Image (tube, helix red, strand yellow):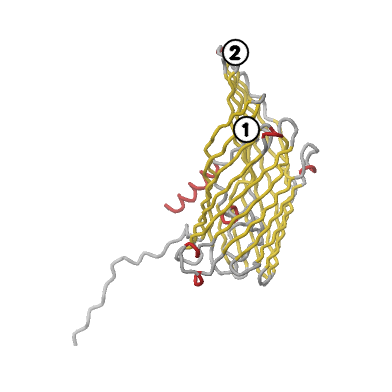
Amino acid sequence: MKKIAVIIGALYLGLLWGGNSIFSYQGFPVRYYGKDIYSLGMGDTGASDIFRYNTGYANPAMHNRDNKTLFGTGLMMGYTIYDSELNGEKQNFWDDALDFPYFNISVPVGKHRLGAQFSPHSSGLVSNQTLLSSGGTEEQTADKYLYKADLIYSANMGTLNLGVSGNLLFGHDKRYFYQSSGFGGFNTRESLIKDFKGQGVTVGILKSFEKLSLGAHYSLPVNLQGESVRSSIHETEASVDYEYKLPAQYNLSFTALPYEQFKLAADLSFEPWSDIDSYYRNSLKAGLGIAYEPDPELHKTAFMRLPMRIGASYRQLEFKDKDGNEIDELGLSCGLTFPLKREVNRIDMGFQYLKRGDLGSNKLSDTSFMFLLGFTGFDLISRSADRTAPRSIPQKEEM
């Protein structure tokens, strides 16, 4: 029961925490692409990396060939710095950040695998307070989360893996506004709360060779349905229908072993947001990573036996800033792995630097410094049988 409580607690915390960004008023700026902590420390690449115990199921065809049940979870913690420039005056603010990017399980059934994953799809959280010339204050808050729950199936057909996942998406977009004028009768408070949900499907394929793996996966467009409710200090209006659309997602990836003990990976994701509305631009995310995977028998020092990696990513956000300018995102990351006693058990650690927006063009930007921590292979559900109970020992019979 304690282990089940830990799992439920982790999921509950995951529902409470997500990515922060100063651009949350315009859209969903923080995006998770379904990779594990190992991949996030390698430029967010690895959708086709079959050369390790991969617990990132962005591509549902990901199939760990060893007959082992795998668990994966992780967290990201650090700081996000908000920067702004108005009339030549620059300001910044440091904010704590704590994200739970995923929790998943994959179970082998012969040459097949069944799995489930819970993760955020996208999010945005920011609050702002301004002092008014009248002596009052104005506060604005954007609270946005879109979650994704997947049921995953994959089949191993030799050097070809096929997979499909059913995706349940649900989330909210909450806006709050409060203004204090210094006179109680003139204060105002308003909120606009939107809730929505829907279903989608993702299909994937992986083709592997001795030192090369190629992958592709595709997600169908989704139309999320819900309702919107506007409230003020005077009344709560009747709810109205609301919809939030997601475009299709196209993904390509490759992983290669160019030299002994080294690995190279690249991922590309494309979403045609202009199909939803001409206001949006098509979103592109590209990542490149290099990993050092040593053979422990070839190295004497403990440090040189640790797998290490480094990578970079570039992303074009689909929405624009308040002035209609485009927003780009640049990420740099690194990481290392601590293998544990059991073959599949490991701890992945890493660091991620992420800069979104630019003061020169957007007058706003945010910079994140995140410590990455991932756990893979731990058996969170079952435990070994208790063999400590007293047993009767037969007595020697006297002849």
Q: Nearer the viewer, mark 2 or mark 1?
A: 2
* Element assignment for label 2: loop
Name above or below for residue 387 compared with residue 98. below
- Residue 302 point in image, percent of width and height: 46, 64
Q: Which of the two labelled residues, at mark 2 and mark 1, occupies the earlier sequence position? A: 2
**Image x and y of residue 111, in percent:** 62, 70
Q: Quadrant of residue 227?
A: top right
Q: Residue 221 placed where, x, y %?
A: 74, 48
- In-image side of 322 versus 101 (left or right): right
Query: Where is mark 1, residue-wise?
Result: 174
Q: In the displayed structure, would residue 59 be above or below residue 169? A: below
Check disc 1 and give the amino acid type. Lys
Label 2 and label 1: CA atoms lie apart by 28 Å
Question: Mark 2 and 1 residues: CB-CB less than 8 Å, in contact?
Answer: no
Q: Quadrant of residue 142?
A: top right
Label 2 amino acid? Ser
The quadrant holding residue 213 is: bottom right
Front residue of this view, candidates 5 and 264: 264
Q: Residues within 10 Å of mark 2 (few under 14, many from 20)?
A: few
Instruction: Write down the residue under mark 2.
Output: 134
Residue 78, compared with residue 167, is above or below; it is above
Out of 337 and 75, give the one closest to the viewer: 337
Residue lying at the far left in this picture: please name it: 398
Residue 274 bears which disc, if any?
none
The residue most toward the bottom is 399
Image quarter of the C terminus: bottom left
Q: Residue at x 53, y 50 (%)?
A: 372
In this rendering, position of residue 110 left or right of residue 379: right
Residue 370 position, x and y percent, is 54, 45
Q: Regarding mark 1 in the picture, which secondary structure is present there?
A: strand
